[in-house]
Structure formats: C-alpha cells, structure tokens
Image (tube, rainbow, N blue to C red):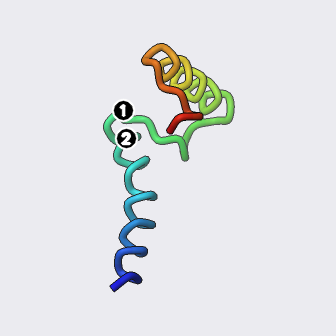
Amino acid sequence: MAEPAAANAVHDHLIDPMEVQHAFSRFGFFADPAESAASAGRLHAFSAEAGYDPAVH
C-alpha cells in the first residue's frame, strides 16, 4: 500500500511544476539560461512581496 502512495507522490512532485508552467504558457525546458534566471528572479520578488518566507515553509 505504501509503494503506490510513494509513486503517486513522486508523480505529483513532477507534474505540479509542469502544470504551473502550462498555466503561464512558458516552459523552462525551452528557455535559455538568462531567461530562466530572469523568471526565477521575478518569482522570488513576487513571493517576497506576498510575504512568503521559504524558511518557514
């Protein structure tokens, strides 16, 4: 019973970021390194502005 749950957790971990990228119509796999870094910077700025503290989560 634990093995299917573990497999589902791994699947969800891989699928969730893909769903986010699909929602934004931007896929990091196809981005060049500069574009990826810029996107990460915008995400971090948005998270900080929203009050998200990665140390807490």
Percent position of residue 6, x then y: 42, 74
Label number found at residue 20: 2
| Quarter of image, res 41 | top right
Q: Where does residue 35 sit, x and y in percent of width and height?
A: 61, 28
Instruction: Give how far apart the Cα atoms at labels 2 and 1 are.
Output: 6 Å
Q: Quadrant of residue 42?
A: top right
Amino acid at circle 2: Val
SS at badge 2: helix
* Residue drawn at the location 53% of the way across and 27% of the way down: 53
- 54 sits left or right of 51 in the view: right
- Locate the N terminus by quadrant: bottom left
Residue lying furthest right in this view? Answer: 33
**Which image quadrant for residue 38?**
top right
The answer to which of 28 and 50 lies nearer the viewer is 50
The disc placed on residue 24 is 1
Q: Categorize mark 1 by other alpha carbons within 10 Å: few (<14), some (14-19), many (20+).
A: few
Residue flagged by tag 1: what amino acid is it?
Phe
At numbered mark 1, what does the secondary structure look like: helix, strand or loop?
A: helix
Identify the residue at horizontal 40%, vertical 40% (top origin): 21
Q: Is residue 18 above or below residue 3?
A: above
In the image: residue 34, left or right of residue 21: right
Mark 2, Cα crowd under 10 Å, few <14 / some 14-19 / many 20+, is: few
Percent position of residue 27, x then y: 47, 41
Q: Residue furthest front?
A: 56
Residue at the image position 38 percent from the left and 60 percent from the top: 12
Give coordinates of residue 57: x percent, y percent: 50, 39
Q: Tell me the mark number nearer the camera, choosing from 2 and 1.
A: 2
In this rendering, would 49 be left or right of 33? left
